[in-house]
Image (tube, rainbow, N blue to C red):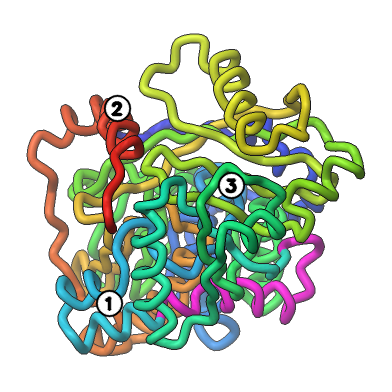
Amino acid sequence: MALTSTPTDLPNSVWAATAPAPIDTQPLAGDVTADVVVVGAGYTGLSTALHLAPDVDTVVLEASEIGFGASGRNNGLAIPTLAKADPEEILRTFGPEKGEATIALIRDSANLVFNLIREHDMEKAGEQNGWIQPAHSPGRMKLVERRLQEWTSRGAKADLLSREALRDLIGSDAWHGGWIAHEGGTVHPMAYARGLAKAAVGKGARIHTRSPATALERVPEGWRIRTPDGSVTAERVVLATNAYSDDLWPRLRRTFVPVKTWQMATKPLSDNVRKSILPGRHALSDTRGDLQFARYDWEGRLVSGASLIFDINSEERLKSMVGARLQRNFPQIGEVEWDYVWSGFLAMTPDFLPRLHVLAPGVFSWLGCNGRGVALATAMGPVLAELARGGAPENAPLPIMEPREMPLHGLVTRFARSDLWRRRRLDAVEFGG
């Protein structure tokens, strides 16, 4: 499934409605040159441009608006882990040298997000007050304990939470304990994307919105990317499109599955209710495969969401289902009323690990946020920037992989959401980690 359309209207999300105003940008008009051209003005593309500036002349092309894709639609949880793979699995897959480098990059990824927010004084872009992962069953506490040990042994700042300690932090008895990664937190996804764009432009990057890349070709000077009204010629190219990759580089989009997820925001909760539900405004997402999560926006709305197998009557089904989940987890919330419901895509790889690619001499990309896009996509910016500067690929923290197209990709993509049945069944199974 190629996401080839390029609408420019932002979704009716709480993030689009409450973000600071964007910087002024214009479509590309005419033929220009640069050292590096970046395709995609989401977290990866903007972080790459920011880390190239000011000494590398960089042009960013965005098909729609800054943060239009996953970067402006996600739940805003900045999490310094992967969703599935923990350090020992990363080591088994990537080997000791690249494995440890990848682990360090992931461990420090949320810190990078909040350091950028502080350094560039991004308005209401985030809060670094910790990410909590509760265990939804007693057996999953063994998973939590193993996960905590693997990450803290490599320098992560985290603590185990007993059921009582967890209840005090989140205001719920619905879970059986958990752990807290202190360097995690929440971002306002659109405010953060716009803050990255403002910082990158302030250092000299050029961003052109409403400028879809329609063709990429080899030329004597390096590469030329064409748009409807112009072109950019550059020595190196960074494709930062992730789940919104299209046919600009067809092999790339067939290496992952774009998975649709739904996010929702309640009406602002009363002061009394907010004092008893996540009173420290922590980020929370649990151990279920069919994830249950919650966090606040700046105006006291509780943001949550879910996945659906079928889109029939989606909004009403989501309001009922997610409202019931919140009431089970936080009975004190009372009747749940919703202000916003929206959706977006994330990129899932078969092994749930990120992939770093050198697609051709001077053309670089990565994909596979697997539900950890806020922190990981930001952290991949400096990695791609170093490659675009001419750094040796063998020095990158992740191994360089050949794009591996998924067999029967179209069929797998079409039926990907049916895997939700399997995840829900596994969520009900007790096991020891």
User: Residue 423's spot in the image, x, y percent?
Assistant: 30, 36
Do the CB atoms of the residues marked 3 and 2 lie less than 8 Å apart? no
**What's under tag 2, amino acid-wise?**
Trp
Residue drawn 64% across the image and 25% down it: 323
User: Residue 364's spot in the image, x, y percent?
Assistant: 30, 68
Residue drawn 41% across the image and 38% down it: 290
Alpha carbon distance from label 3 to label 2: 22 Å
Among the two numbered marks 1 and 3 on one chain, the one whose residue lies closer to the N terminus: 3
Q: For the C terminus, which image quadrant? A: bottom left
The quarter holding residue 104 reads bottom left
**In the rendered image, which residue does mark 2 sit on?**
421
User: Nearer the viewer's eye, disc 3 or disc 2?
Assistant: 2
Asked if one can make out residue 171 in the rendered structure from this viewpoint, the answer is: yes
Residue drawn 41% across the image and 44% down it: 288
Q: List the single residue furthest toward the top.
A: 313
Q: For the N terminus, which image quadrant? A: top left
Among the two numbered marks 3 and 2 on one chain, the one whose residue lies closer to the N terminus: 3
**In the rendered image, which residue does mark 1 sit on?**
398
**What's under tag 3, amino acid-wise?**
Asn
Q: Nearer the viewer, residue 308 or 226?
A: 308
**In the rendered image, which residue does mark 3 sit on?**
75
